Image: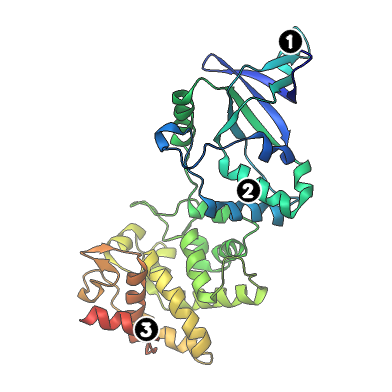
Amino acid sequence: MSNGDFFHSFPAIRGVQAGKPCFIAMCPMRIIPTLFKFDEEEVPPELRAQRTINKSRIPEIASYLIENPNDYTLSSLTASVNTMVNFEPLGDTGSGQNMGTLFIPMDAQILINDGQHRRAAIEHAIKDNPEIGYDNISVLFFIDEGLQRSQQMFADLNKHAVRPSDSISTLYDFRDSLSNLARFLSKEVEVFARMTEMEKSSISNRSSKLFTLSSIKNASKSLLRKGSKVLVSEEDKALAADFWTEVTQNMPDWVKAKNKEVVTYELREQYIHAHGVMLQAMGNIGADLLSDYESNWKEKLTLLSKIDWARQNKDWEGRALVHGRLSKARTNVLLTGNYIKQHLGITLNDIEEQIEKEFQQ
């Protein structure tokens, strides 16, 4: 290195991917906004190495950092450096030859291949809480081999990214009050405890399960009329458990499935009540029951056992079914709920009345 040059220096580990050197370094978060640049948004996509940033994602990630300063996790950034870097190892042999200090010229252009939303969120969060700037984030550095290689890196990094299912996210999320509620109900309500798919958000044809954890969460969110970040109290949990237990007692097929007296995949094949559209509709209905029929909501639920839940019941077409296929679209959930409400003797609200009128035309 020339004494006249200026460099960023980072403790780093040297490695090799696809025969090319790469370096992993821990960088203070406070330098991330100035160290890494974006391709300008007005540059055409074919001349950029990354997608245009989705600004709506930034506040969510930033809030996560700000609200959990002592308990957050951020994955590595991946970046390309448009010039040669210098690596000074700690030793000439053994592990020391791949551990040392990475020097990057200050005039080098460093572009993020993966993590531009994290970078923007870090910048946003530091403005609110400067202490976050003293934390570190790992960065994987590659040597830039031109636009085509950078574009290929972006494609490769995102090609195999798979968003986790809503159910497993619910299972593992201990910060979210509604996820905590769903896990509580999956243990407290007996039919849920025996019949809930905890990992997937859809149930395979031959599965022995009847519900998904994500559908329990979403239906219970509607039941309690809770927003995503609203605290669920112990009283709320007890009320939700009481409601779903009462629903179960008036759904003989659920009880038979729990007791293994019927085959669950046959229920899903033949009946509406074995699917998420019914559970979501019941969550909506329950919210009205608990608020408008406080003294006799359990009595109203006894009429559930009188409903013909069979797919062959033509009344379900256009409601839970669209051309014979189940639909969880909002309109179909509401129309399914309307049908159930009519059988339970519950008054439709204004939105439900309008949707029902349009359906009947």
Of labels 1 and 3, earlier in sequence is: 1
C-alpha distance separating marks 1 and 3: 73 Å
The percent position of residue 343, horizontal first and vertical second, equals: 33, 85
Rendered location of residue 15, percent (x, y): 63, 18
Quickly name the residue at label 1: 94
Percent position of residue 100, x then y: 75, 18
Q: Earlier in the sequence, mark 3 or mark 2?
A: 2
Report the quarter where the C terminus lies.
Answer: bottom left
Q: Is residue 172 above or below residue 269?
A: above
Q: Secondary structure at mark 1?
A: helix
Residue 155 vs 57, above or below: the answer is above
Answer whether residue 139 is visible to the viewer in this image.
Answer: yes
**Residue at image x 56%, y 66%?**
185
Mark in the foreground, 1 or 3: 1
Tell me the kind of residue under disc 3. Answer: Lys
Which one is nearer the viewer's eye here, 225 or 33?
A: 33
Residue that mark 2 sits on: 121
Label 1 with label 3: CB-CB less than 8 Å: no
What residue is pinned by disc 3?
Answer: 341
In this rendered view, identify the residue nearer to me: 316 or 66. Answer: 66
Q: Secondary structure at mark 3?
A: helix
Identified by mark 2, the residue type is Ala
Relative to 357, residue 129 above or below: above
How many C-alpha atoms fall within 10 Å of the one at disc 3: few (<14), some, or many (≥20)?
many
